[in-house]
Image: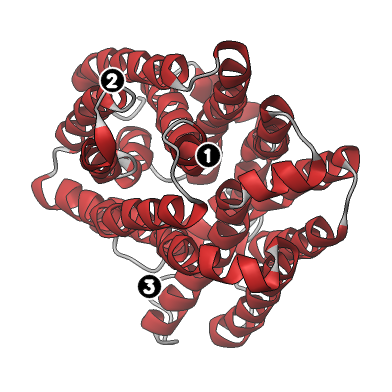
Amino acid sequence: MTISDTRPRRPVITILVVCQSSIGLIFGGIGLFLPLIRTDLDLTFTQAGTLAAASNLTYALMQVPSGYLADRFTPRRLFMIGLFGMNLLAMLFAVLDSYPLLLIDQALAGFFRALVFTPGMLLMTALFPPGRRATAMGLYVVGGFSSNILLSAVGPLLVGPLGWRLLFLLFAGFGLLSLVLYRLLAGPASTRPTSSAVRFTELPRLVRKRIVQLTGVIQFTRLAVAQGFTFWLPTYLVVDRGQSLTTAGLVAATASAISAPVNYLGGWLSDRINRPLLVIGGSLTVLTVGLTLLTYVPGMIGVLGVVALISLAVQVYFGPLFALPLQVLGDRNAGLISGFGNFCANLGSFAFVYALGAVKDATGSFRAGFLSLAVLCVVALVATRLTRPLLTPPPPPT
């Protein structure tokens, strides 16, 4: 679909955000209900971390193939297949009792989740003018944050009478309903000409581009921080700070409520002032300070202040960061470039969601894990500074 289609854009934009929110409910539910899941299945912190890490690993490995397929064919079909598979596996997660089977379920969930992200982002950007690319990308992930607000606020109240298993079945049902609505609103899939089809062999040439390498480092940091912080925050509040699951859920809901609008506003601001590096660098600076302070501030008032600070910056640079290499290299390989960037991001997520659980088991505290995320933000700040000379697109080849 393109912006020239006669079909109204706003309903399609809305349902794309809703579809993304269904994925946020499933993945966010694992993090929120992890204390209950861990107790029911008698899992260690390391084993609990591997449930997310297994999903993140296959999700990361599928990013480049997913982006290539989205460039080679229409992204709509991939998006629908991924959404269907993800929700079906959420139903299975609700009825399985064995840790190895849950691990396999989450590994497969990562595969299908990858078919949703990059194709869905391309579907969203096709509905906006080229000059609003960062805005479109920021809006696309608002659904995930919006669903986390609802989940964190209402989930702890419902999990008592309903149980986490029934809630996952409800999440999956909502996702399948969203898929049906998208199919009705989006209409038939468009076709792309094959004469300019992207070849997978172009990937090594793209990876050698300095802009792709540097943004890959920042992407690694982005999701390592976002997922490491979001996934372990409820457990950190319950275990290290002695709070109830209801309180932890309310804090997580507040964090998502802060992140959702600023995520969109970050893309809008980047497009408005045409200074993506300012948005990226400012966000990383705030995250460095917040993650350093998180485990040192006394009392819950201090913790809430630091969580709010981190939430303001944790994903605000999502849109500018994905748009940055496309600004230099153009749109022809948009899926492949975005897929590689999200591959790097999910390597970071896989490594640090697992590492924070392992560090907790080894040291009895989350402090070393959160401080390691702060150090990672400093590395990304250096990569951001090195990106500045590359923003002028190279001249066309003669």
Q: What residue lies at 83% left-to-right and 45% top-to-bottom?
A: 102
Quadrant location of residue 371?
A: top left
287 on left or right of 140? left
Badge 3: residue crowd in 10 Å (few <14, some 14–19, many ≥20): some
Q: What residue lies at 62% left-to-right and 44% top-to-bottom?
A: 35
User: Tag 3: residue type?
Assistant: Ile
State the mark number for residue 235: 1
Does dot 3 land on a helix, a strand or a loop? loop
Where residue 119 sits: x, y (%)? 57, 55
Q: CA distance from mark 3 to mark 2?
A: 44 Å
Does dot 2 land on a helix, a strand or a loop? helix
Vertically, is 213 above or below 85?
above
Q: What residue lies at 63% left-to-right and 18% top-to-bottom?
A: 361
293 on left or right of 239? left
Vertically, is 84 above or below 202?
below
Where residue 210 sits: x, y (%)? 38, 16
| Sequence-wise first label, 3 or 2 | 3
Vertically, is 182 above or below 134?
below
State whether residue 197 appears in this view. Answer: no
Q: CA distance from mark 1 to mark 2?
A: 18 Å
Vertically, is 347 above or below 66?
above
State the mark number for residue 3: 3
User: Tag 2: residue type?
Assistant: Thr
Where residue 358 sits: x, y (%)? 63, 19
Where residue 344 sits: x, y (%)? 53, 27
Badge 1: residue crowd in 10 Å (few <14, some 14–19, many ≥20): many
